[in-house]
Image (spheres, rainbow, N blue to C red):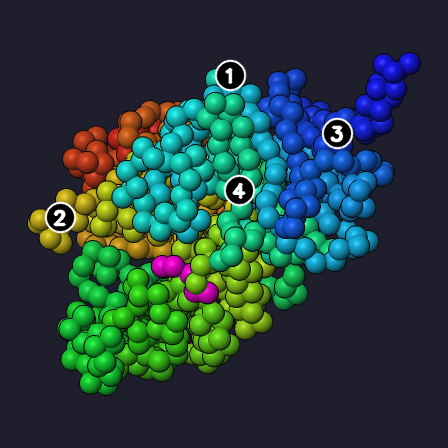
Amino acid sequence: MKKISIILLLFGCLYKTFAQDVTSPSKNIKVNFSLTEKGEPTYQVSYKENTIISKSKLGISVKDGIALTKDFSMIKTEKKTVNETWKPVLGEDSTITNHYNEIRFFLNQKDTNTKLNIVFKVFDEGVAFRYEFPIDNEVKYFVISEENTEFTLTGDHKTFWIPGDYDSQEYAYNETKISEIDNAKLDLENGVGLKSILSQYRVQSPLMMKSSSGLYINIFEAAVLNYPVMHLDVDIDTFQLTANLAPNAIGDKAYLRTPSQSPWRTIMVSDDAKDILSSKMILNLNEPCEIQDTSWIKPMKYIGIWWEMHIGISTWDYAGSQNAHNAGTAVGNMIPSGKHGATTENTKKYIDFAAKHGFDGVLVEGWNVGWEDWYGKWKEDVFDFITPYPDFNIKEIADYAKAKGVKMIMHNETSGSVANYERHLDRALGLMKKYNYPAVKSGYVGRIIPRGEFHDGQTMVNHLNFVTQRAAEYNIMVNSHESVRPSGYHRTYPNYIASEAARGNEFNAWSKGNPPEHETILPFTRLLGGPMDYTPGIFELKMSAYDPTKREQVHTTLAKQLALYVTLYSPLQMAADLPRNYEKHLDAFQFIKDVPLDWQKSIYLEAEPGHYITVVRKDKNSENWFLGAITNKNARQTTIKLDFLTKGKKYKAIIYQDGEDADWQENPKSYEILTKTVTQTSSLKLNLAKGGGTAISFELIE
């Protein structure tokens, strides 16, 4: 009798188990959600009967010791299927299909009477899930202390990763097995982040992987709103990944109130790498456009006073360190250094070049007071965003640009002082509106103020979204640098036209540079969340051209720099080099002038992360197509069928390719331009040099 009583008591402590499957429309992907005997929510994911994510726990920890990780019972479930199309304002494709099966699990925690919903959307290219905190909870305000989401992988996959630095994504990618991830073994000079609380085994998402069986897996997130960015803690022995959220100054992760929800956690999977690149799942998980009239949101191809500072020809500051602000020298009393780049005269030269070659805009950095005393000082109010240097006549330049049919792009460097920027934001946007600036490039170099906040924390996520929304009220587009990396928010606010949020082309001017495989990885990682302002188009590839003692160089051929305009999608693209370098190669420069920035259709023809990408895109406003093909440090030959061209039509193919002796290290400027007549039945053989590429325009012959 005693034995029976013990057994009954044991079962009285357990919860009713629950399990349910949901599949993708194609049936290739299946998610199994379950509650364990302890009431723990778990899930697992399979692709074509292969387990991708083995049983993994879900849950949230709330401050003051409440763990929403167990003791749940199922209240009910709701299912639905969505199959719709929508049109982005700007994009890789003019029409996007949003097709998924959804299931929502309504859970209740017995002892706390806390309700938690977990929602799954299963697409043909992957799985997304998030947590919802419904309004009918007794506790209306709460603090997230941890997110307990797990991704338990099934093997020691090859992985493309960067360290989990809460303050910077500006690292070159590492390619190792999961078991070999170890930040302690990295040469961290390869990045310029602040190494903020850099855990030995923490990486950033998106995390791109390839299994030994040839499956491509990507873990990321979508619709990050009022929540920190997700990093991933890695158990190198069990291959388990756990969500890690950037904390605020006192260690809290997020402040929420009901009703609210977490961002979507996403798992993409395919046996073809091209499917990862062509997926629109991240965009589809964001809310539809909030801007009623989007007619002012337009693609922009621009040049600017920028690269000349990176290569040391000119400076951002007006006077130089000998008259720095911290020495108490007023701007009006400063002695000009003679190297200031953002002068009225110099800006007019760039405007002339833009007008001559049909560019939309000119960016000018270093135009406003404060650059003598900005970097690394952690000062609250270095910039006011409205006061120009004495040698930059903002009205004269605006009038000159208008007369030439060129738009100016504003630059607002915050030096990490986001509170200061928010105080000045309306004045800054008002100045842009007054002088007809349609876009702003914002920067967030340095540690964040308020002190103790991180670039990837909730405060900065909210700041970036606030700036985008506020700019939309002024009909101004935003291009953010050193910012939170995007997660599809440009669907909701398409004036968020681009961002950097990764290691850009500038690193080639003054550091170890970006290795030749870098641009073949970015589309599988950073660009899944949104367009990148990578600033391609460098033609003078060795920095010794400016200073014989310099050994830095761009780690590509010139032809690859052209191809990047197609492979790295963005509706905002810079021709980043000096005008004089383009004038030496006007035949190659023609491709940059011709390539559109907004597309009707994109087709990824070949792809392998870390190795190569070939993509063709059809201009939204014509029948012309453009191809970009890039490779890593290895030379590559491939044959491309042109069956994407319209049947029965002839096209002039203008091929910009590496010369026979091209090599990114030895002879990067060797290129040749060929012209052929082609049709849908034609094929082209591409020869890519080491670190090389090919760019092709297909012009319809009437």
- Residue that label 3 marks: 38
Q: Which mark is residue 244?
A: 4
> Of the residues tagged 4 and 3, which is closer to the observer?
3
Up-down: is 158 above or below 565?
Answer: above
Q: Which mark is residue 213?
A: 1
User: Which of pointers 2 and 4 lies earlier in the amino acid sequence?
Assistant: 4
Mark 1 packing: few (<14 Cα in 10 Å), some, or many (20+)?
Answer: few
Mark 2 packing: few (<14 Cα in 10 Å), some, or many (20+)?
Answer: some
How far apart marks 2 and 1 lie (CA) works out to 44 Å
How far apart marks 3 and 1 lie (CA) works out to 34 Å
Identity of the amino acid at label 3? Lys
Residue in view at x 29 percent, y 51 percent: 506
Can residue 617 be seen here? The reply is: no
Identity of the amino acid at label 1? Ser
Q: Secondary structure at mark 3?
A: loop
Up-down: is 261 above or below 161?
Answer: below
Residue in view at x 63 percent, y 64 percent: 291
Work out which quarter of the rendered image holds the N terminus and state it: top right
Predominant SS of the magenta segment: loop
